[in-house]
Each structure stands twice: as C-alpha cells, then as structure tokens.
C-alpha cells in the first residue's frame, strides 16, 4: 500500500488464490522479483524468481529527453546487472538450499540478421545483437560486456570490479526470453540511414528493417548458454488462429528444443502496461 504503507493483505490474498488455482491445474507459477515491487509472502510459497522484467526507457514508453543519453543508459544498465548479481548471490547463499527454487532474469530479445551479404551489414548485425540482449546476457553468462560494445564505447562503458566478477559467476538457473519479433539489419557507419532506434554511434550505428523482398524474417538459432530457456512472452500476428488451442500448441512445439523448458504466451490483457488503449 505505497512505499511507506502497510502490507496489502487483500492483494496477498488475491495472489494466494491465484497461485492455488494455478497449482491445482498443474501450472508452476513464476514471479518477477521487481516489476516493480517485491512481495515477500509470495516468494515463500514456491521460490522461483526472475530478478527483472524486460526494462527499457525509450520514446515509445516515456519521455527520456532529460540527462545524457550518450552515457546514462550504460550506467543504468550496469547497475541493473549488478543488482541482479547481488540478488542471485543473496538467494544462492541464504535461501536456495532450503527453498530449492530457481532464479534467473527476463530480457526482451529481438533477433537480428544481415539485410544483405555485405561485410558491413554482417558487422552491423553483430553490433545490433551486442547492443540489445547480449548487453545483459554476456555479463551475466560470460562475465563481460560484448566485444562490439567495448570497441564502440570504449571508456564510456562501465567496468566490473573483481568483486563484481565474483558475484557474476553465480550466474542464473534459467534465461527468461521475451521474443516478439526479428529484424534485418543495415549498416549505418558506411551507409546513409534514416534516423531511428540504433542508428546513432552510442547505440551501435545500425538500422532495423522488418521485411526483405516482402517477407518478414525470424528463424530458430542456437544460443551460447547451457542454462534452461524460458520463453516468457511470445505471440503471433495471425490473431484469429492464435485463439485456437491447436494452433497455440503447434506453435509452442515448433519452438521447442532440448534447452527450452517453458513457453509462456501473452495476450491482449497482459500487455496493457506497454501503451495507452
């Protein structure tokens, strides 16, 4: 009930009933640790946490004109990574042995492919992947920022201390993936690009395109982590078919691989926070 208020028992009761109903149907609940509150009573029930939701401040979701957009996004992201590592460290050392739960992070993960076979578009695609999901995945899974980001940003990119590195080694138990779409990538260093997301130097100097020759892109690829993957949100542009249970099942099966454990499917009502309706 607000930052300094009492615990909202009515809210706790609602989620308790929701959890009971899910468990009764054989569904294992997962909760996001900070979206953006931390209800302790719910954690004690089942012990599976995603430390963060997919977070991004941009023109689509809010006014970010104040401050220094050349540097501050990297400071904010650095602190998100460190807070994830700190939360994992606390959970690993104090609670996981008794709770036998899991902890991971949820990220918005678009996929990128070169628009052409040119070397420039190929390098731009590497930068796009680096400045998007790998910005967070690489430090958490590999213990360092992507090389493409380091080359572009230099000293602008914050550094991890040796103490930070020790906590990052705690890793995660699963990768939470919100995958909505994929893009073709065009280079913006040696080619002229229309202004937009990704086109500035501090964002990686690339342009996103959804179609080539009239066809959208997006294919299954391998990933670098052995941690189980949880596809938290996904969907289909074929709206009417997607309401059909068989279509939803076939779509989920088509994505399944040995490393993919869970697929969650969003709907209209789960995304009201994204925009005004």
Image (tube, rainbow, N blue to C red):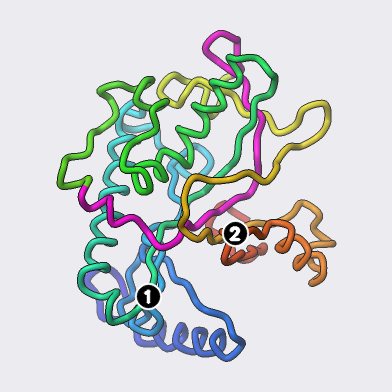
Please give the name of the residue rendered at 31% of the width and 48% of the height, measured from the top-left corner. Answer: 81
Is residue 154 shown above or below 249? above
The residue where tag 2 is placed is 233
Tell which circle, 2 or 1, labels the residue nearer the N-terminal end: 1
The reply to whether residue 272 is visible in this rendering is no
- The quarter of the rendered structure image containing the N terminus is bottom left
Q: Which mark is residue 101?
A: 1
Q: Element type at marker 1?
A: loop
Q: Which mark is residue 163?
A: none
For label 1, the crowd category at 10 Å Cα-Cα, with few meaning under 14, some 14 to 19 and many 20 or more, is: some
Front residue of 65 and 102: 102
The reply to whether residue 212 is visible in this rendering is yes
Disc 2 to disc 1: CB gap under 8 Å: no
Magenta stretch, residue numbers: 166-194
Is residue 78 shown above or below 203? below
Please give the name of the residue rendered at 75% of the width and 68% of the height, measured from the top-left corner. Answer: 249
Percent coordinates x, y for residue 219 in the rendering: 70, 43
Q: Quick check: is 167 in the magenta stretch? A: yes
For label 2, the crowd category at 10 Å Cα-Cα, with few meaning under 14, some 14 to 19 and many 20 or more, is: some
- The quarter of the rendered structure image containing the C terminus is bottom right
| Tag in front: 2 or 1 | 1
Percent coordinates x, y for residue 83 in the rendering: 26, 53
Kindly report the distance in space between the C-alpha atoms of the residues bearing marks 2 and 1.
21 Å
Is residue 243 shown left or right of residue 257? right
Q: Element type at marker 2?
A: strand
Q: Quadrant of residue 230?
A: bottom right
Please give the name of the residue rendered at 65% of the width and 25% of the height, measured from the top-left corner. Answer: 114
Percent coordinates x, y for residue 61 in the rendering: 50, 45
Percent coordinates x, y for residue 15 in the rendering: 46, 83
Front residue of 118 and 54: 118
Is residue 67 shown left or right of residue 256? left
Please give the name of the residue rendered at 25% of the width and 23% of the height, measured from the top-left corner. Answer: 155
């Amino acid at each position: 009930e607000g930052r300094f208020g009492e615990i909202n028992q009515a809210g706790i009761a609602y989620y308790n009933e929701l959890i009971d109903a899910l468990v009764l149907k054989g569904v294992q609940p997962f909760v996001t640790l900070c979206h953006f509150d931390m209800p302790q009573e719910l954690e004690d029930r089942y012990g599976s946490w995603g430390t963060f939701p997919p977070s991004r401040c941009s023109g689509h979701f809010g006014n970010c004109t104040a401050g220094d957009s050349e540097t501050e996004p990297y400071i904010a992201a650095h602190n998100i990574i460190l807070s994830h590592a700190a939360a994992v460290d606390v959970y690993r050392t104090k609670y996981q042995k008794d709770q036998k739960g899991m902890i991971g992070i949820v990220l918005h993960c678009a996929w990128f492919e070169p628009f052409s076979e040119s070397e420039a578009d190929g390098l731009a695609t590497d930068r796009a992947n680096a400045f998007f999901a790998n910005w967070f995945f690489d430090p958490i899974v590999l213990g360092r920022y992507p090389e493409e980001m380091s080359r572009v940003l230099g000293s602008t990119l914050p550094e991890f201390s040796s103490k930070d590195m020790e906590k990052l080694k705690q890793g995660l138990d699963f990768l939470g993936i919100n995958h909505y779409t994929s893009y073709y990538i065009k280079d913006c260093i040696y080619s002229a690009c229309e202004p937009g997301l990704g086109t500035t130097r501090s964002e990686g100097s690339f342009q996103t395109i959804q179609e080539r020759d009239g066809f959208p892109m997006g294919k299954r690829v391998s990933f670098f982590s052995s941690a189980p993957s949880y596809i938290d949100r996904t969907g289909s542009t074929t709206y009417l078919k997607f309401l059909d249970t068989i279509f939803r099942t076939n779509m989920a099966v088509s994505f399944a691989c040995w490393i993919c454990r869970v697929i969650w499917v969003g709907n209209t009502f789960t995304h009201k926070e994204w925009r005004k309706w």
